[in-house]
Image: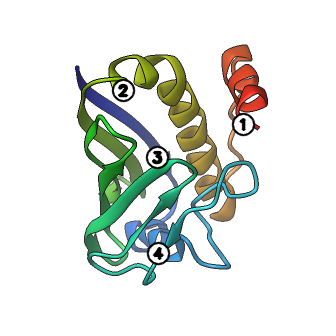
Amino acid sequence: MQVRNIHERWISSPATVVGALIGTLASNDDQLWPNHKWPPMKFSKGLEFGSKGGHGPIRYFIQSYDPNKSIRFQFTGPKGFNGYHSFWVEPSGSGAVLQHVLEMKTSGFALLSWPLIFRPLHDALIEDSLDKAERNLGGNPSGNRWTWWVKALRWLLR
């Protein structure tokens, strides 16, 4: 199954300021990843090309990194996730758009696990991430509300 999943948020800060959040990923002062609610993002060698890591059961390596602009991760797990996910920033009017894109082709067990388990969790996590970014730049996001299914999955997977 071909998957293209996009989440984006317009933030009323310059693109360089929004982009700087990407550079904090997996650090002690992570301003983008919602590690207060979700498994933290970790890398073997920090934010550099080829560094291996992931979050929870999701594994990947850094395929490209343009500081203050974008980062792209190539999946290595779970099995059947063949593709990438990325964050990038683009100027937009008096602010910037922070976007997360996931593109992959699923196979095997991932044909079921993506739509039933991983997609709902992924969507909630990324919306929490965009909320955190907006909040850290002085915005007041309305707050991501988890569905009953996301709450049930999180309870089951503990």
Under circle 3, the secondary element is: strand
Q: Which residue is disc 3 drawn over?
A: 10
Name the residue located 45 percent from the left edge and 78 percent from the top edge: 44
Q: Secondary structure at mark 4?
A: helix
x, y (%) of residue 100? 39, 46
Q: Quadrant of residue 28?
A: bottom right
Which labelled disc corresponds to residue 143? Answer: 1
Q: Position of residue 21 (x, y in %)?
A: 51, 69
Query: Which residue is under mark 4?
Result: 20
Judge from the rendering whether residue 120 lies leftward or rightward of residue 10; answer left or right.
right
Q: Which mark is residue 110?
A: 2
Q: Earlier in the sequence, mark 4 or mark 3?
A: 3
- Disc 1 element: loop
**Which residue is at 56% across, 48% downward?**
130
| Alpha carbon separation for disc pair 2 and 3 | 31 Å
- In front of the other: label 4 or label 3? 4
What residue is rendered at 54% in x and 55% in y?
55
Q: Considering depth in this image, is 45 or 28 the residue closer to the camera?
A: 45
Image quadrant in which you'd find residue 70 = bottom left
Q: Amino acid at mark 2?
A: Ala
**Residue 138 occupies which quadrant of the picture?**
bottom right
Amino acid type, label 1? Gly
Q: Residue at x 60, y 33 (%)?
A: 124
The kind of residue tagged 4 is Ala
Cα–Cα gap, marks 1 and 4: 22 Å
Sequence-first disc among 2 and 4: 4
Q: Is residue 21 above or below residue 152?
A: below
For badge 3, the amino acid type reads Trp
